[in-house]
Amino acid sequence: MRNLMIAFALTFAVACNNQTETQEETAHDDGSTHVMEADTRTAMSTDPDFTIESAAHQQLLRDFYTAYINLKEGLVAADNQRTDRAAKEMRTIITDASFNELEGEAHDHIAQMGRDVIRMVEHSDVEEQRNYLNSLSTSLFTMLKAGDIQTEAYLQHCPMAFDNQGAYWVSDKEEIRNPYYGDRMLKCGSVRETL
């Protein structure tokens, strides 16, 4: 009986300790929404379980990627006008009815990209727009892989973004030009994957 009581006490202590750690982590993560989003999206895989075979969808994806590159370069230069124009162009493309015909995981990525683009359009401040780039980028890179659009794309990563949580972006060049820090840390980052 005594051994049973000791085992119960140890189990209870371990369970309480785990609950405390979870609460601390939650309290820490609640400090900033974009850190939580960046951390969540950083861990995600960019390997699609689908393909985009329609020529019309592939063209929309190419057009979106071109606008995304303009947005990314605007963030590098901290150019509000350029990022605003690119975000609005991306919104027009992402809301195309035929693009939204995609189903399953492809639809989920389109929806995430749409949410991020709408947030960027709503917030014309470059610093605010950077908060949505990570999830936009990982979804876009997944779509580019699924679409096989025959263009160069580099998934790049800055380990220091979002208080050292790290964040991704997509580039059409191998050279690192960090959109999270711009000229403050232009070369901070590395290529993680290439198409």
Image: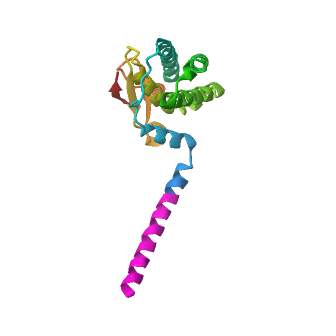
Which residue occupies 64% across, 28% down?
123
Which residue occupies 40% across, 75% down?
10
45 in relation to 155, above or below: below
Which residue occupies 49% across, 63% down?
19
Could you tell me if residue 188 is visible in this image?
Answer: no
Q: Is residue 97 magenta?
A: no
The quadrant of the picture occupied by the N terminus is bottom left
Could you tell me if residue 28 is visible in this image?
Answer: yes
| Chief SS of the magenta region | helix
Query: Which residues make up the magenta segment?
Result: 1-23
Q: Position of residue 139 (x, y in %)?
A: 47, 29
30 in relation to 102, above or below: below
Q: Is residue 6 magenta?
A: yes
Q: Position of residue 181 (x, y in %)?
A: 47, 30
Residue 34 left/right relative to 144: right
Residue 24 left/right relative to 1: right
